[in-house]
Image (cartoon, rainbow, N blue to C red):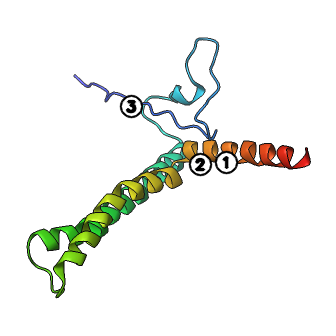
Amino acid sequence: METSAPVVMETLSSDPLGKSDDDEDGRSTDDVATSGTKVTVKRKKQIHLKHRRVTKMTALMISASCICWTPSLLYHADLTWVTDAHWFGVFAMWLAYCHTLADTLIYAIMNRRVRAEMARMARNAKSQVVGMCRR
């Protein structure tokens, strides 16, 4: 007896805010499968680009973790070559704290929805400043 593999549906949208058009029955037009497990070339390209963006973001976040936490690890393992280890320890601690900021910025820069919202907020702030200057 032959069984077919389940089809996994992913919602990809070209809209920067993640909104997609819905059919009358409430299903997203992106969720509708073509014949069985066949995937169009356009859909494969969308999935590939999505995976590529996620891979880039993950690589950047791992790199930031390594860069920010390595000095702290060296300091606490007494593997420093610095003569005045106290200042190196302070530097290592602040660099580890900066890792939180780095992760947030990487996510904000790499995420389309966050970028779109930040651009909208910047436009609103600009129009408010221009309006205040004209008074």
Q: Residue 62, labelled with which disc? A: none
User: CB under 8 Å between callouts 2 and 1?
Assistant: yes
Left or right relative to 71: residue 24: right
For numbered disc 3, what is the local secondary structure? Answer: loop
Closer to the camera in the image, 12 or 4? 12
Residue 102, quarter of the rendered image: bottom left
> Which residue is situated farthest in the right direction here?
134
Residue beneath disc 3: 8
Seen in the picture, residue 35 relative to 129 is either above or below; the reply is above
Q: Is residue 36 left or right of residue 59?
A: right
Relative vertical location of residue 65 with respect to residue 71 in this rendering, above or below: above
Q: Are marks 3 and 2 in contact (CB under 8 Å)?
A: no
| Residue 27: % across, % down | 55, 18
Q: Is residue 51 left or right of residue 29?
A: left
Which three-letter amino acid code belongs to the residue tagged 1? Ala
Q: Which SS class for mark 1?
A: helix
Task: Return the mark for residue 119.
Answer: 1
- Residue shown at 30% from the left, 69% from the top: 67
Report the residue marked by disc 2: 115
Rounded to the nearest angstrom, the CA distance separating label 3 from label 1 is 33 Å
The image shows residue 39 at horizontal and vertical percentages of: 48, 39
Asked if the residues shown at circle 3 and circle 1 are in contact, with their CB atoms under 8 angstroms apart, the answer is no
For this rendering, which residue is in front, 130 or 87?
A: 87
In which image quadrant can residue 131 be found?
Answer: top right
Q: Mark 3 or mark 2: which comes first in sequence?
A: 3
Identify residue type, mark 2: Arg
Q: Amino acid at mark 3?
A: Val
Residue at 49% x, 29% y: name it. Answer: 35
Image quadrant containing the C terminus: top right
